[in-house]
Image (cartoon, grey):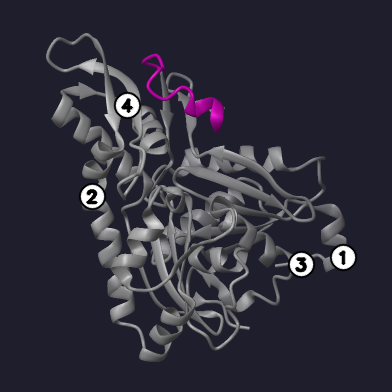
């Protein structure tokens, strides 16, 4: 395939990095930084097949649409579940990120969860190409997050990172620019929302939507007992009477609701440490674990992990943007970071 000379390509296109998340998608434009942060939601008119809204506008429609319009999340647990809708969303984001019409499509670096299959990687690559990308590069999210957090990846030092996103939790031990041990669990922010919704339905006999469950998690979510108890008033449909009802939810309720899912994440982190080489474990004991992703903002989670794993736990600066900042770093010098990019057929791209 013909490749443009580097200097000409840079003038005639705008390269972008994308954190293709289950809950939110972030876009980084080379030379400008993060320009888009949108929920990964698309509203589709079922009668015409047309996309009605993308991102925040579509998210506001969840649970409020007429029968012929559906607000869908095209990514489930970090992977594409609806190829055509994902393509439409990527096309919208790529066009929105371009400040002016370019002669050539952009080179795109996309972060994906670790451990996804070749078929799933190919689906991401094809969706981006069909959406207008000239070249597509794939990077595993733990690696991108570590780059974005400026962790010492290239050094012979073990670095452990836990990335709790919307659909998946990525746990990785890295050293010398590669992943030594990793585990991906399909329990993260969305699962916690479902836990909260199920708990309220079971304990209070009230039905709430996913938006409300997420709002509760953000407002009063906590994994450790708070000095000052937190509480939030919510409204939902009473399952007994079928009428609207208002109740007060506390941080204690949320703790009980999400306890099982958090235990799964902790057990996965322990498993990664238990199977790692002893030298790498010694590095982690000395340096600590780095926590990133939206889940890092859950009150008390760093303290819980530190207590369970017996190592220090640090929340990285601006945990919501580390993956997309990592893709931006790769964009600055793709040749330098080529060894950490993933190929859909052969695993890691070789230099």
Measured as percent of width and height from the top left, residue 200 is found at: 21, 30
Q: Are marks 3 and 4 in contact (CB under 8 Å)?
A: no
Residue at the disc numbered 1: 7
- In whole angstroms, how far apart are the C-alphas of marks 1 and 2? 53 Å
Per the rendering, the mark at residue 142 is none
Crowding at mark 1 (Cα within 10 Å: few <14, some 14-19, many 20+): few
Q: Look at 68% across and 65% down and name the residue there.
A: 329
Q: What segment carries the magenta color?
A: 54-68
Crowding at mark 4 (Cα within 10 Å: few <14, some 14-19, many 20+): some
Measured as percent of width and height from the top left, residue 202 is found at: 14, 31
Residue at the disc numbered 2: 259
**The C terminus lies in which quarter of the figure?**
bottom right
Residue at the disc numbered 3: 3
Between disc 2 and disc 3, whose residue precedes?
Answer: 3
Between disc 3 and disc 4, whose residue precedes?
Answer: 3
How many marks do you count on the picture?
4
- In whole angstroms, how far apart are the C-alphas of marks 1 and 3? 12 Å
On the image, which quarter does residue 119 sit in? bottom left
Crowding at mark 2 (Cα within 10 Å: few <14, some 14-19, many 20+): few
Measured as percent of width and height from the top left, residue 113 is found at: 44, 60
On the image, which quarter does residue 251 sit in? top left
Q: Look at 65% across and 75% down and name the residue there.
A: 337
- In whole angstroms, how far apart are the C-alphas of marks 2 and 3? 52 Å
Q: Nearer the viewer, mark 2 or mark 3?
A: 2
């Amino acid at each position: 395939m013909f490749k443009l000379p580097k200097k000409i390509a840079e003038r005639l296109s705008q390269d972008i990095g994308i954190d293709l998340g289950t809950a939110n998608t972030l876009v980084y434009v080379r030379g400008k930084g993060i320009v888009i942060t949108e929920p990964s939601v698309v509203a589709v008119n079922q009668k015409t097949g047309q996309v009605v809204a993308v991102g925040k506008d579509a998210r506001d429609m969840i649970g409020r649409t007429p029968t012929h319009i559906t607000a869908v999340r095209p990514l489930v647990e970090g992977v594409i579940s609806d190829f055509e809708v994902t393509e439409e969303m990527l096309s919208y984001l790529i066009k929105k990120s371009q400040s002016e019409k370019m002669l050539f499509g952009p080179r795109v670096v996309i972060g994906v969860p670790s451990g996804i299959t070749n078929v799933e990687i190919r689906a991401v690559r094809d969706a981006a190409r069909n959406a207008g990308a000239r070249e597509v590069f794939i990077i595993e999210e733990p690696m991108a997050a570590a780059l974005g957090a400026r962790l010492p990846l290239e050094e012979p030092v073990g670095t452990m990172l836990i990335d709790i996103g919307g659909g998946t939790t990525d746990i990785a031990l890295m050293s010398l620019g590669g992943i030594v041990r990793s585990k991906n669990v399909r329990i993260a922010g969305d699962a916690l929302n479902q836990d909260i919704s199920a708990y309220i339905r079971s304990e209070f006999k009230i039905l709430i939507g996913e938006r409300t469950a997420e709002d509760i998690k953000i407002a009063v979510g906590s994994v450790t007992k708070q000095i000052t108890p937190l509480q939030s008033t919510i409204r939902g449909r009473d399952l007994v009477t079928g009428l609207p009802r208002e109740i007060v939810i506390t941080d204690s309720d949320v703790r009980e609701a999400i306890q099982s899912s958090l235990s799964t994440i902790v057990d996965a982190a322990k498993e990664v440490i238990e199977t790692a080489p002893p030298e790498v474990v010694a590095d982690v004991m000395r340096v600590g674990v780095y926590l990133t992703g939206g889940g890092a903002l859950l009150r008390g989670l760093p303290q819980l992990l530190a207590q369970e794993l017996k190592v220090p736990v640090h929340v990285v600066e601006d945990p919501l943007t580390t993956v997309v900042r990592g893709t931006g770093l790769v964009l600055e010098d793709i040749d330098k970071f080529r060894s950490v990019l993933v190929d859909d057929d052969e695993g890691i791209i070789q230099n």
